[in-house]
Amino acid sequence: GIRPEHLHLAPDGALAIAADVVEALGADTLIHGRLGDNTILTIRLPGSTRVKEGDQLKLTAAPDNLHLFDRTSGARLG
């Protein structure tokens, strides 16, 4: 798991999404999109970020911000 504010745009990012919905909210911009496997993902970026629906985005996150869970039990790992 990862919080929307912990994802960042990066040209060499490991995650790629297509922006389905872009919500410009002043101080923040929320982007709702899908990964290649159709997993829904929401990103919170600064309000000055210019993204439009249909844009392809590359994302990254610091490893310290990732939360891993056991697939069977749902228990948080670490």
Image (cartoon, rainbow, N blue to C red):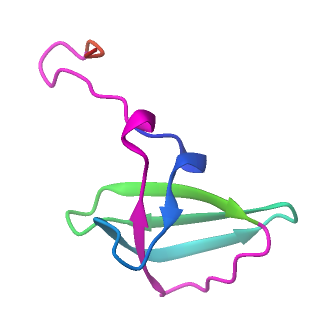
* Count of numbered circles in the view: 0
On whether residue 67 falls in the magenta region, the answer is yes
Residue placed most toward the observer, 36 or 7:
7
At 82% from the left edge and 64% from the top edge, which residue is drawn?
25
Q: Is residue 48 left or right of 7 when viewed as pictured?
A: right
Give above or below for 5 relative to 38: above
Residue range in magenta is 47-74
Please, which residue is most extreme toward the right here? 26
Write down the quadrant of residue 51 in the picture. bottom right
Residue found 45% across the figure and 36% down from its top: 65
Q: Nearer the viewer, residue 55 or 63?
A: 63
Answer above or below: position of 34 versus 58: above
Residue 56, placed above or below residue 16:
below
Q: Position of residue 62 (x, y in %)?
A: 43, 46
Q: Is residue 24 magenta?
A: no
State the predominant SS element of the stretch in magenta: loop
Q: Position of residue 38 (x, y in %)?
A: 27, 63
Q: Is residue 20 left or right of residue 34?
A: right
In the shown orientation, is residue 45 left or right of residue 53?
right
At a point 12% along the width and 18% down the height, the residue shown is 72
Quadrant assignment, res 78 = top left
Closer-to-camera residue (55/6): 6
Residue 73 appears at what percent x and percent y? 17, 12
Quadrant in the picture for the N terminus:
top left
The location of residue 39, given as percent across then percent down, is 30, 56
